Amino acid sequence: VDPPDLLRIAVGVAILVYVGYCLLNQKVWVRGEIGLK
């Protein structure tokens, strides 16, 4: 595996984790807002 490939994989994983984290936070936030109402 070449270093560029490692970098590409690292960036891809970071983006997936970031998107998943944002979606999870959004779900929790929306659920909290509905719970408050």
Image: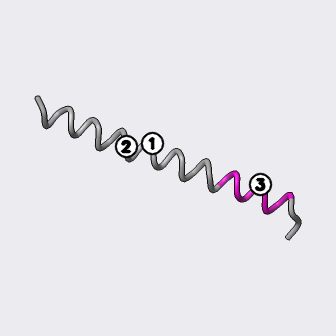
Asked whether the residues under the numbered discs 3 and 1 touch, taking CB atoms below 8 Å apart as contact, a structural biologist would say: no
Return the mark for residue 25. Answer: 2
Gap between marks 3 and 1, in whole Å? 21 Å
Name which quarter of the figure residue 7 lies in: bottom right
Residue at 42% from the left image edge and 43% from the top image edge: 23
Q: Please report the bounds of the magenta region as a residue range.
A: 4-12
Asked whether the residues under the numbered discs 2 and 1 touch, taking CB atoms below 8 Å apart as contact, a structural biologist would say: yes
Amino acid identity at mark 1? Cys
Percent across and percent down for residue 13 are 63, 56
In the rendered image, the residue lying farthest to the left is 37
Residue at 22% from the left image edge and 40% from the top image edge: 31
Above or below, 18 relative to 6: above
Residue corresponding to mark 1: 22
Residue corresponding to mark 3: 8
Lower position in the chain sequence, tag 2 or tag 3: 3
In the rendered image, the residue lying farthest to the top is 37
Name which quarter of the figure residue 26 lies in: top left
Whether the magenta-drawn stretch holds residue 8 is answered as yes
Q: Quadrant of the C terminus?
A: top left
Q: Secondary structure at mark 2?
A: helix
Whether the magenta-drawn stretch holds residue 19 is answered as no
Above or below, 5 relative to 31: below
Q: Secondary structure at mark 1?
A: helix
Lower position in the chain sequence, tag 3 or tag 1: 3
Percent across and percent down for residue 15 are 61, 47
Q: Secondary structure at mark 3?
A: helix
Above or below, 22 relative to 16: above
Gap between marks 2 and 1, in whole Å? 5 Å
Amino acid identity at mark 3? Arg
Dot 1, crowdedness within 10 Å: few (<14), some or many (≥20)? few
